[in-house]
Each structure stands twice: as structure tokens, then as C-alpha cells.
Image: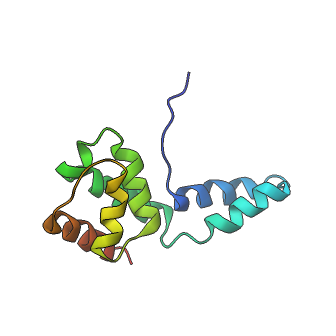
Amino acid sequence: MTKDRYVTLAEVKEMLEAEADSREFTPEQKLALEHARTAKQSAEQARELKGKLLELEFVGDLNNAEAVAVKITDLMPAHFDDVRLIFQKERRVLDKKQGEQIIKLVNEYL
């Protein structure tokens, strides 16, 4: 039995591009690849950012920490309000300092 894991859009792009070389995609798979190409960073950068986000105590201790880190990595929020909205679903209120930490990390990868 395999364990489910969350992957960033950049990682999906990497997987689909590798697979596209070996076979013909269905129309849905072509659309998925086209969407994945909108990723704002490389798969390696996305993995790095996700890892750094998970190291932040207020992110890493969430029940759904990996999903939140992936969402932040995919969206690359530039404003505190955007970060706050991501955490709202987790029923966690971020203070301004925590939001600034996330934005600072994200800006390193833009």
C-alpha cells in the first residue's frame, strides 16, 4: 500500500514532461500538462521551498501541514491577506510576523 503525498505543481510538471516523452497523452493529460507549465519555479525550487515552509513551527505543527506548504508553494502569495486566506481553512489565525516570514521565504524563490 502506498502512502499518499502532496506534490507541487512544479513537481507535477516534471513528472508529466518526463512521461510525455515516452507516450501519447489523452486530451485531459495534455490539459493537465499545459496547466502544470504555469508553475512559477522549478521542481527543485518547489521542493526546497516546501521543505523550508514545513520547518516553520506554525506551519509544521498543522494537521495538514504538507497540504498547506504545497498550496503556498503553488500560489506564491505576495501579500499577507493571501497567506491569511490559505490558513483560514485550517482554522489558524496568523499574526502579521508569521505572515511576513512566509512572504519573505516566497520572495526568495520569485
Instruction: Give the left or right position of residue 4, taking residue 56 as reference.
Output: right
Residue in view at x 54 percent, y 69 percent? 39
Instruction: Give the left or right position of residue 15, taking residue 54 as reference.
Output: right
Q: Nearer the viewer, residue 62 or 43?
A: 62
Q: Is residue 2 above or below residue 57?
A: above
Q: Nearer the viewer, residue 90 or 106?
A: 90
The number of discs equals 0
Residue 40, percent from left and from top? 50, 73
Residue 108 can be seen, yes or no: no
Residue in view at x 76 percent, y 55 percent? 29
Judging from the image, the colouring scheme is: rainbow
Residue 3, percent from left and from top? 50, 29
Q: Residue furthest top?
A: 1
Residue 2 can be seen, yes or no: yes
Residue in view at x 79 percent, y 56 percent? 28
Which corner quadrant of the image does residue 98 belong to? bottom left
Q: Nearer the viewer, residue 43 or 107?
A: 107
Residue 87, percent from left and from top? 32, 55
Which corner quadrant of the image does residue 81 belong to? bottom left
Which quarter of the figure is the N terminus placed in?
Answer: top right
Which quarter of the figure is the C terminus placed in?
Answer: bottom left
Q: Nearer the viewer, residue 42 or 90?
A: 90
Residue 97, percent from left and from top? 13, 67
